[in-house]
Image (spheres, rainbow, N blue to C red):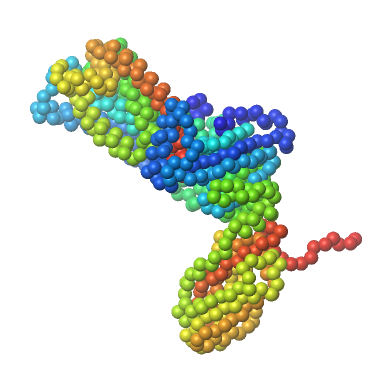
Amino acid sequence: MLDGRFLAWRLFIRNVRSQYRQSVLGILWAFLPPLVTALVWVFLKQQSVFAVAETPVPYPVFVLTGTILWQVFLDGLNIPLRVFTQSKSMLTKINFPREALILASIYEVMFNLLVKFVLLIGIYAWFAVLPTVYVLFGILGVIMLALLGTSISLLLTPLALLYGDIKRAILISTQFLFFLTPIIYPVPKEGAAKILAQINPIAHLLTPSRDWLTTGDTLAVDTFMITSVFTLIALICGMILYRIALPHLVERMGS
Amino acid sequence: MIDNRNSTDALHEEQGSQDTLVKVNGISKKFCRSLKRSLWYGVKDVSSDLVGGRKHDELRKDEFWALRNVSFELKRGECLGLVGHNGAGKSTLLKMLNGLIKPDQGRIEMHGRIGALIELGTGFNPILSGRENIYNNAAVLGFSKEEVDAKFDEILEFSEIGEFIDSPVQNYSSGMKVRLGFAVASQLDPDVLIIDEVLAVGDVGFRSKCYERISELLNNCCVILVTHSMPQISKLCNRVILMRKGNIVEVGETGKIIEAYYELNDVVANQKIIFDKFIRFNSIQLEKNTLSSREEDFKIDLEVVSEINSNEIAIDLVFMNRELTPIAQINSKFLKQEISISQGLNRLSIIISELNLNVGLYKLSCNIFNTSTGQQLMWIQDIAEIKVTGDFVGHCPFLLQGTISEIDT
């Protein structure tokens, strides 16, 4: 892993620069998706198109934090797969430390995460939300969310590099998951929605992170811990799988 | 199994010419013809690797041996050429040597730092500047930041890019991209250098610079070179492996193998009519298809059907090499011979008094003109193909007759 640090850094710089160099708004594009999504929900709620249970903080803060955290998870899920796919020709032609690609994706995920923190700080200042010392746990939670995405991504990589189906499946299932995860509404107290939230690992990380970032008080510490441990285990498994699978994938990808 | 990039300095100390850097022992590789099945086998292979399951030594459905039981060794200072037709398994072998894919059977042992010139400019991003791309490309090739910083000026100078270094690479000409790619790659200081036909690009001046650089590297490493160009092989290699359908056919000294390579070729002309409005091609008869490098009075009979009568005809027969570069011609106008042609079948005899072609395959094309108007009457590409064999293999298409001797003083 250490071998490829310079390479990973260069790849990260290359990917980020090439994304933003050919655009006028540049880095603004990192802010826009969660902001726009959240504003739509705030607007719909204001118009009473739908009703949700009372939230512990003003709804705009609640939903903005939620969508930003969701975006962090999505980045963790999508960026590694994007980096691997883009590097196909490199993988089939040059023998470089393969882990550099993982590291480069993690750098990019963390970079996007930093950008989103800037956005969050702006929002909290605007709505005069005073963070507590638990914000630090919140930051840990956000990192966990990114790593959860990354580990799912790594576990799917062998299949995703071989079959195009995986990418399409991810696209569709994340759209569903957005609504099934308590992002635009608080954790349901009863019914099927409650069960769904209970078996959804994203919810176990997202809900307490949001609580920590906003009110500083959460009820779900133990499930957060368990999910975090599982996330780390999954991450390690994902890396091992990646390492073992890659020569086979390179062989099947052709040049 | 493949011992890359970790034992970088292990062998640097003993710079003896006798150390074996590459040891390939009975490696085989399977490939699958059907894509769907290949992907599925990929999934299966990954899972059996995960649980440490048994390896499939036998062929599964739709599989074939892309490489079968290949062994060789290479010492420092040696340059090994790999030749063979498309699908012979050369690139597969290179990929395994480079550690990109694993052999299904056998072992590969490599010592020292491995450098591969398989594709130039990998990792280039068109939007970014040449400067940024030098860093990216170098990082992919395994340089550290300090190494690139130290070598940056040298790379820049070698590439001849000059002031354009800060422009985006998408504005570069293809030649500039290649130069930049090679400039970075040439800074590698490998123990084992793997080259796959990259030398065939760029302009002449730059190409000679590349050769120069490779010969410099040769002093300190061993080289494995894959190319279709026999002149390149004869210029650089001291040992050649001839491959066919995944097997080694013959290993040996350069001249012998190049001859064997051409023996494997069948000479089949695949005549293409480019233009035949006034004169149509009927047949061509070569005295023989396999020539030596010292051919005398080589006879060719040509039959054409004409629709016109004319006594101002010029006939031009061109010899072209594998890359379709014209290398020699016989032309009736140059020979100051007036040819006349009449309606109906015409038989023409062409005799080349001396033909000293280098060993290789050559294609012929035929042109017929009107000498006064310059109008083209017939043009047939690939009208015939010949093979030249012999014990001397040069690296120029044409050999000159003459004498070379010492002058008594």
Kindly identify the residue that appears in the image at 38 percent across and 20 percent down: A233
Say whether residue B255 is visible: yes
Kindly identify the residue that appears in the image at 69 percent across and 50 percent down: B253
Kindly identify the residue that appears in the image at 64 percent across and 75 percent down: B299
Question: A1 left or right of A51?
Answer: right
Closer to the camera in the image, B49 or B352: B49
Q: Name the spot of residue B362 as percent of width and height, x first.
A: 59, 64
Question: B45 left or right of A115?
Answer: right
Kindly identify the residue that appears in the image at 31 percent across and 26 percent down: A73
Q: Residue furthest front?
A: B58
Tell me if residue A64 comes above or below residue B30 in the rendering.
above
Question: A109 left or right of B391?
Answer: left
Closer to the camera in the image, A37 or A170: A170
Q: Name the spot of residue A23 as percent of width and height, x first.
A: 34, 40
Closer to the camera in the image, B146 or B375: B375
Q: How many numbered markers are drawn?
A: 0
Tell me if residue B370 comes above or below residue B365 in the rendering.
below
Closer to the camera in the image, A138 or B338: B338
Q: Name the spot of residue A85 as percent of width and height, x first.
A: 39, 38
Say whether residue A16 is visible: no
